[in-house]
Image (tube, grey):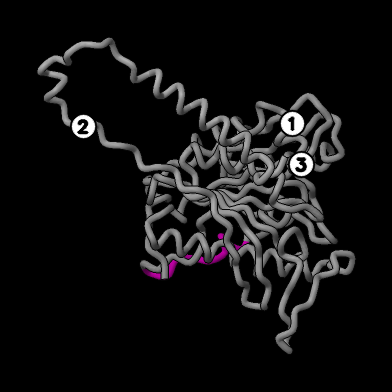
Amino acid sequence: MSYFSNRRYSLRRIAVCFSLGILSTIVPTGTPSAHAQAQPPTKKPTPIPQPRKVELATKDGVELSGVYFGSNKGKDAIPVLIVHEWKGQKAPYGPLCVTLQRAGCAVLAFDYRGHGGSREYTDQRGEKQEFKIETMRRRSVNEITQIDMETAKKFFKEENNAGNLNLNALVVIGIREGCVIGTNWTHIDWMYPSVGSRKQGQDVKALVMISPKRQVQGVSIDQSLNDPNIGRLPTMLIYGKGSSEQSDTDRIQKLLEVNKRRFSGNRTAEGLEVSEIGEPLGGAALVNGQSTVIPSIVKFITENVKVGEDHTQWIERD
Protein backbone atom coordinates (compact mmCIF):
# COMPACT_ATOMS: atom_id res chain seq x y z
CA MET A 1 0.00 0.00 0.00
CA SER A 2 1.55 3.35 -1.02
CA TYR A 3 1.38 6.53 0.99
CA PHE A 4 -0.90 8.07 -1.58
CA SER A 5 -3.32 5.13 -1.70
CA ASN A 6 -3.11 4.93 2.09
CA ARG A 7 -4.37 8.46 2.55
CA ARG A 8 -8.02 7.41 2.93
CA TYR A 9 -6.94 5.00 5.64
CA SER A 10 -5.02 7.77 7.42
CA LEU A 11 -7.99 10.12 7.25
CA ARG A 12 -10.26 7.45 8.74
CA ARG A 13 -7.77 6.95 11.56
CA ILE A 14 -7.62 10.68 12.18
CA ALA A 15 -11.44 10.90 12.18
CA VAL A 16 -11.69 8.10 14.75
CA CYS A 17 -9.10 9.74 16.99
CA PHE A 18 -10.90 13.06 16.64
CA SER A 19 -14.20 11.47 17.67
CA LEU A 20 -12.58 9.87 20.69
CA GLY A 21 -11.10 13.22 21.62
CA ILE A 22 -14.55 14.81 21.58
CA LEU A 23 -15.96 12.04 23.74
CA SER A 24 -13.17 12.44 26.27
CA THR A 25 -14.00 16.12 26.74
CA ILE A 26 -17.70 15.62 27.52
CA VAL A 27 -18.49 16.64 31.11
CA PRO A 28 -21.74 16.65 33.11
CA THR A 29 -23.97 19.64 32.45
CA GLY A 30 -24.15 22.38 35.02
CA THR A 31 -22.26 25.46 36.09
CA PRO A 32 -18.50 24.91 36.40
CA SER A 33 -16.91 25.67 39.75
CA ALA A 34 -15.06 28.90 40.38
CA HIS A 35 -11.82 26.89 40.55
CA ALA A 36 -12.47 25.44 37.10
CA GLN A 37 -13.33 28.88 35.72
CA ALA A 38 -10.07 30.27 37.10
CA GLN A 39 -7.87 27.72 35.30
CA PRO A 40 -5.83 29.17 32.43
CA PRO A 41 -6.69 27.81 28.98
CA THR A 42 -4.76 24.70 28.01
CA LYS A 43 -2.11 25.39 25.40
CA LYS A 44 -2.94 23.62 22.17
CA PRO A 45 -0.22 21.25 20.93
CA THR A 46 1.54 22.21 17.73
CA PRO A 47 -0.18 20.38 14.88
CA ILE A 48 1.69 17.78 12.88
CA PRO A 49 2.58 19.22 9.46
CA GLN A 50 0.96 17.81 6.35
CA PRO A 51 3.29 15.64 4.24
CA ARG A 52 4.59 17.52 1.22
CA LYS A 53 6.30 16.64 -2.02
CA VAL A 54 9.88 17.84 -2.42
CA GLU A 55 12.24 17.94 -5.39
CA LEU A 56 15.91 17.56 -4.51
CA ALA A 57 18.40 18.77 -7.12
CA THR A 58 21.75 16.96 -7.17
CA LYS A 59 24.99 18.60 -8.22
CA ASP A 60 25.10 16.47 -11.38
CA GLY A 61 21.69 17.39 -12.77
CA VAL A 62 19.28 14.83 -11.31
CA GLU A 63 15.94 15.83 -9.79
CA LEU A 64 15.16 13.44 -6.95
CA SER A 65 11.49 13.01 -6.07
CA GLY A 66 10.68 12.84 -2.37
CA VAL A 67 7.94 13.19 0.22
CA TYR A 68 8.72 14.94 3.49
CA PHE A 69 6.79 14.16 6.66
CA GLY A 70 7.72 17.07 8.94
CA SER A 71 7.65 17.00 12.73
CA ASN A 72 5.96 19.21 15.31
CA LYS A 73 8.83 18.79 17.79
CA GLY A 74 11.18 21.37 16.32
CA LYS A 75 14.80 20.90 17.39
CA ASP A 76 13.85 17.77 19.34
CA ALA A 77 12.75 15.92 16.18
CA ILE A 78 14.74 12.86 15.10
CA PRO A 79 15.26 12.93 11.31
CA VAL A 80 14.76 9.59 9.55
CA LEU A 81 15.90 8.84 6.01
CA ILE A 82 14.18 5.98 4.13
CA VAL A 83 16.34 4.22 1.49
CA HIS A 84 14.28 1.88 -0.69
CA GLU A 85 15.43 -1.29 -2.46
CA TRP A 86 16.98 -1.62 -5.93
CA LYS A 87 14.27 -1.49 -8.63
CA GLY A 88 11.93 -0.22 -5.93
CA GLN A 89 10.58 3.18 -4.89
CA LYS A 90 9.47 5.19 -1.88
CA ALA A 91 5.72 4.73 -2.40
CA PRO A 92 5.11 1.50 -0.41
CA TYR A 93 6.62 2.94 2.76
CA GLY A 94 4.00 5.61 3.44
CA PRO A 95 2.52 3.80 6.48
CA LEU A 96 5.99 3.57 8.05
CA CYS A 97 6.60 7.27 7.39
CA VAL A 98 3.24 8.32 8.84
CA THR A 99 3.75 6.27 12.01
CA LEU A 100 7.25 7.65 12.54
CA GLN A 101 5.91 11.17 11.98
CA ARG A 102 3.21 10.64 14.62
CA ALA A 103 5.97 9.54 17.01
CA GLY A 104 7.63 12.95 16.52
CA CYS A 105 10.18 12.10 13.83
CA ALA A 106 10.86 14.13 10.68
CA VAL A 107 10.90 11.63 7.81
CA LEU A 108 12.19 11.92 4.25
CA ALA A 109 11.39 9.16 1.75
CA PHE A 110 12.88 9.73 -1.68
CA ASP A 111 13.48 7.89 -4.95
CA TYR A 112 17.15 7.74 -5.77
CA ARG A 113 18.28 8.12 -9.39
CA GLY A 114 16.84 5.73 -11.96
CA HIS A 115 13.93 4.77 -9.71
CA GLY A 116 10.32 5.84 -9.08
CA GLY A 117 9.88 9.53 -9.79
CA SER A 118 13.63 10.15 -10.27
CA ARG A 119 14.13 8.64 -13.72
CA GLU A 120 15.32 11.75 -15.57
CA TYR A 121 18.50 13.79 -15.56
CA THR A 122 19.84 16.82 -17.43
CA ASP A 123 22.91 16.13 -19.56
CA GLN A 124 25.81 18.49 -20.29
CA ARG A 125 23.92 19.96 -23.26
CA GLY A 126 21.00 20.86 -21.01
CA GLU A 127 18.76 18.19 -22.50
CA LYS A 128 16.58 15.80 -20.53
CA GLN A 129 17.60 12.16 -20.63
CA GLU A 130 16.12 9.07 -18.98
CA PHE A 131 18.04 6.56 -16.89
CA LYS A 132 18.03 2.98 -18.13
CA ILE A 133 18.08 0.87 -15.00
CA GLU A 134 19.26 -2.20 -16.93
CA THR A 135 22.55 -0.39 -17.66
CA MET A 136 23.06 0.97 -14.13
CA ARG A 137 26.00 -0.78 -12.46
CA ARG A 138 28.60 -0.13 -9.76
CA ARG A 139 29.23 3.46 -10.88
CA SER A 140 25.54 4.29 -10.55
CA VAL A 141 25.39 2.75 -7.07
CA ASN A 142 28.38 4.85 -6.02
CA GLU A 143 26.68 7.98 -7.41
CA ILE A 144 23.57 7.17 -5.40
CA THR A 145 25.65 6.62 -2.27
CA GLN A 146 27.90 9.65 -2.64
CA ILE A 147 25.63 12.18 -4.38
CA ASP A 148 21.96 11.31 -3.87
CA MET A 149 22.33 10.50 -0.19
CA GLU A 150 24.33 13.67 0.39
CA THR A 151 21.63 15.66 -1.43
CA ALA A 152 19.02 14.21 0.93
CA LYS A 153 21.20 15.20 3.88
CA LYS A 154 21.47 18.72 2.47
CA PHE A 155 17.67 18.95 2.62
CA PHE A 156 17.77 17.86 6.26
CA LYS A 157 20.51 20.43 6.91
CA GLU A 158 18.21 23.21 5.71
CA GLU A 159 15.41 21.90 7.93
CA ASN A 160 17.88 21.69 10.82
CA ASN A 161 18.92 25.33 10.46
CA ALA A 162 15.24 26.32 10.31
CA GLY A 163 14.81 24.69 13.72
CA ASN A 164 12.55 21.94 12.40
CA LEU A 165 14.70 18.93 13.37
CA ASN A 166 18.01 17.85 14.89
CA LEU A 167 20.35 16.61 12.16
CA ASN A 168 22.78 15.40 14.83
CA ALA A 169 20.31 12.60 15.67
CA LEU A 170 19.89 11.17 12.17
CA VAL A 171 18.57 7.63 11.62
CA VAL A 172 18.91 5.71 8.34
CA ILE A 173 16.41 2.97 7.44
CA GLY A 174 17.40 0.75 4.52
CA ILE A 175 15.28 -1.86 2.77
CA ARG A 176 16.97 -4.77 0.97
CA GLU A 177 19.70 -3.27 -1.28
CA GLY A 178 18.95 0.09 0.34
CA CYS A 179 20.79 -1.29 3.38
CA VAL A 180 24.01 -1.42 1.33
CA ILE A 181 23.54 2.15 0.13
CA GLY A 182 22.50 3.50 3.54
CA THR A 183 25.24 1.73 5.50
CA ASN A 184 27.99 2.61 3.03
CA TRP A 185 26.89 6.25 3.13
CA THR A 186 26.89 6.15 6.94
CA HIS A 187 30.46 4.85 6.75
CA ILE A 188 31.35 7.89 4.60
CA ASP A 189 29.45 10.28 6.88
CA TRP A 190 31.48 9.13 9.88
CA MET A 191 34.76 9.79 8.04
CA TYR A 192 34.22 13.57 8.26
CA PRO A 193 35.56 14.93 11.57
CA SER A 194 34.42 18.19 13.10
CA VAL A 195 36.68 21.16 12.45
CA GLY A 196 36.57 23.35 15.53
CA SER A 197 32.91 24.18 16.11
CA ARG A 198 32.04 23.28 12.50
CA LYS A 199 30.33 19.91 12.25
CA GLN A 200 30.71 18.18 8.88
CA GLY A 201 29.46 14.66 9.50
CA GLN A 202 29.07 11.92 12.11
CA ASP A 203 25.35 12.63 12.19
CA VAL A 204 23.93 9.11 11.83
CA LYS A 205 23.14 7.79 15.30
CA ALA A 206 21.28 4.55 14.46
CA LEU A 207 20.69 2.13 11.59
CA VAL A 208 17.65 0.00 10.76
CA MET A 209 18.06 -2.74 8.14
CA ILE A 210 14.90 -4.36 6.79
CA SER A 211 15.36 -7.59 4.77
CA PRO A 212 19.01 -6.61 4.27
CA LYS A 213 21.04 -7.63 1.23
CA ARG A 214 24.85 -7.75 1.22
CA GLN A 215 25.42 -6.51 -2.31
CA VAL A 216 23.90 -4.31 -4.98
CA GLN A 217 25.29 -4.32 -8.53
CA GLY A 218 28.68 -5.55 -7.31
CA VAL A 219 28.94 -3.10 -4.39
CA SER A 220 29.27 -4.84 -1.03
CA ILE A 221 28.26 -3.83 2.49
CA ASP A 222 30.98 -5.90 4.21
CA GLN A 223 33.72 -3.28 4.48
CA SER A 224 31.37 -0.80 6.14
CA LEU A 225 30.21 -3.42 8.64
CA ASN A 226 33.82 -3.77 9.82
CA ASP A 227 34.14 -0.02 10.48
CA PRO A 228 34.43 0.69 14.25
CA ASN A 229 32.13 3.69 13.83
CA ILE A 230 29.40 1.45 12.41
CA GLY A 231 30.03 -0.97 15.27
CA ARG A 232 29.27 1.75 17.80
CA LEU A 233 25.87 2.59 16.32
CA PRO A 234 22.66 0.99 17.62
CA THR A 235 21.52 -1.27 14.81
CA MET A 236 18.30 -3.19 14.17
CA LEU A 237 17.97 -6.10 11.75
CA ILE A 238 14.50 -7.26 10.68
CA TYR A 239 13.90 -10.20 8.36
CA GLY A 240 11.31 -12.83 7.51
CA LYS A 241 12.08 -16.41 8.52
CA GLY A 242 12.61 -18.48 5.40
CA SER A 243 12.77 -15.41 3.14
CA SER A 244 15.32 -15.00 0.37
CA GLU A 245 17.11 -12.40 2.52
CA GLN A 246 17.65 -14.67 5.55
CA SER A 247 21.11 -15.91 4.56
CA ASP A 248 22.36 -12.37 3.89
CA THR A 249 20.86 -11.21 7.18
CA ASP A 250 22.64 -14.02 9.04
CA ARG A 251 25.97 -13.01 7.50
CA ILE A 252 25.41 -9.32 8.27
CA GLN A 253 24.47 -10.22 11.85
CA LYS A 254 27.71 -12.20 12.32
CA LEU A 255 29.86 -9.37 10.95
CA LEU A 256 28.15 -6.84 13.20
CA GLU A 257 28.49 -9.10 16.24
CA VAL A 258 32.25 -9.44 15.67
CA ASN A 259 32.60 -5.67 15.25
CA LYS A 260 30.48 -4.83 18.28
CA ARG A 261 32.25 -7.35 20.53
CA ARG A 262 35.58 -5.90 19.47
CA PHE A 263 34.34 -2.44 20.38
CA SER A 264 32.72 -3.41 23.70
CA GLY A 265 35.52 -5.75 24.78
CA ASN A 266 33.14 -8.49 25.94
CA ARG A 267 31.09 -11.36 24.55
CA THR A 268 27.93 -9.32 24.20
CA ALA A 269 27.19 -7.59 20.90
CA GLU A 270 25.84 -4.46 22.57
CA GLY A 271 23.52 -2.27 20.56
CA LEU A 272 22.38 -4.96 18.12
CA GLU A 273 18.71 -5.93 17.96
CA VAL A 274 17.63 -8.75 15.66
CA SER A 275 13.95 -9.32 14.92
CA GLU A 276 12.91 -12.49 13.10
CA ILE A 277 9.36 -12.45 11.75
CA GLY A 278 7.83 -15.91 11.47
CA GLU A 279 6.84 -15.61 7.81
CA PRO A 280 8.93 -15.66 4.61
CA LEU A 281 8.20 -12.01 3.83
CA GLY A 282 10.61 -9.36 2.63
CA GLY A 283 10.77 -5.65 1.80
CA ALA A 284 7.47 -3.79 1.63
CA ALA A 285 5.49 -7.00 2.21
CA LEU A 286 7.32 -7.47 5.50
CA VAL A 287 6.90 -3.85 6.58
CA ASN A 288 3.22 -3.58 5.71
CA GLY A 289 2.12 -7.19 6.08
CA GLN A 290 3.13 -7.78 9.69
CA SER A 291 1.48 -5.60 12.33
CA THR A 292 4.46 -5.81 14.71
CA VAL A 293 7.13 -4.52 12.34
CA ILE A 294 6.40 -0.78 12.17
CA PRO A 295 5.80 -0.39 15.95
CA SER A 296 9.05 -2.26 16.66
CA ILE A 297 10.99 0.12 14.39
CA VAL A 298 9.48 3.18 16.08
CA LYS A 299 10.25 1.72 19.51
CA PHE A 300 13.85 0.96 18.56
CA ILE A 301 14.47 4.47 17.25
CA THR A 302 12.85 6.36 20.11
CA GLU A 303 14.58 4.22 22.74
CA ASN A 304 18.06 4.32 21.21
CA VAL A 305 18.30 7.90 19.93
CA LYS A 306 17.92 10.45 22.72
CA VAL A 307 17.98 14.04 21.53
CA GLY A 308 19.84 16.48 23.76
CA GLU A 309 22.57 14.16 25.02
CA ASP A 310 26.21 15.14 24.54
CA HIS A 311 26.48 13.40 21.17
CA THR A 312 23.05 14.55 19.93
CA GLN A 313 23.04 18.25 20.76
CA TRP A 314 21.39 20.49 18.18
CA ILE A 315 24.02 22.37 16.15
CA GLU A 316 23.51 24.96 13.42
CA ARG A 317 25.21 23.98 10.16
CA ASP A 318 27.15 25.92 7.56
Query: Which residue was labeled with disc 2?
Result: 41
Residue 112 lies within the magenta run: no
Q: Position of residue 180 (x, y in %)?
A: 73, 54
Give the camera-side residue of 63 and 172: 63
Label 2 crowding class (10 Å Cα cut-off): few <14, some 14-19, many 20+? few
Query: Which residue was labeled with disc 3?
Result: 283
Query: Which residue was labeled with disc 1?
Result: 289
Marks 3 and 2 sit apart, C-alpha to C-alpha, by 47 Å
Q: Residue at x 71, y 44 (%)?
A: 92
Horizontal side, residue 270 vs residue 126: left or right? left
Horizontal side, residue 238 vs residue 135: left or right? left
Magenta span of residues: 188-196
Sequence-wise, the earlier of marks 1 and 2 is 2
- Which quadrant holds residue 271? top right
- Which quadrant holds residue 137? bottom right
Label 1 crowding class (10 Å Cα cut-off): few <14, some 14-19, many 20+? some
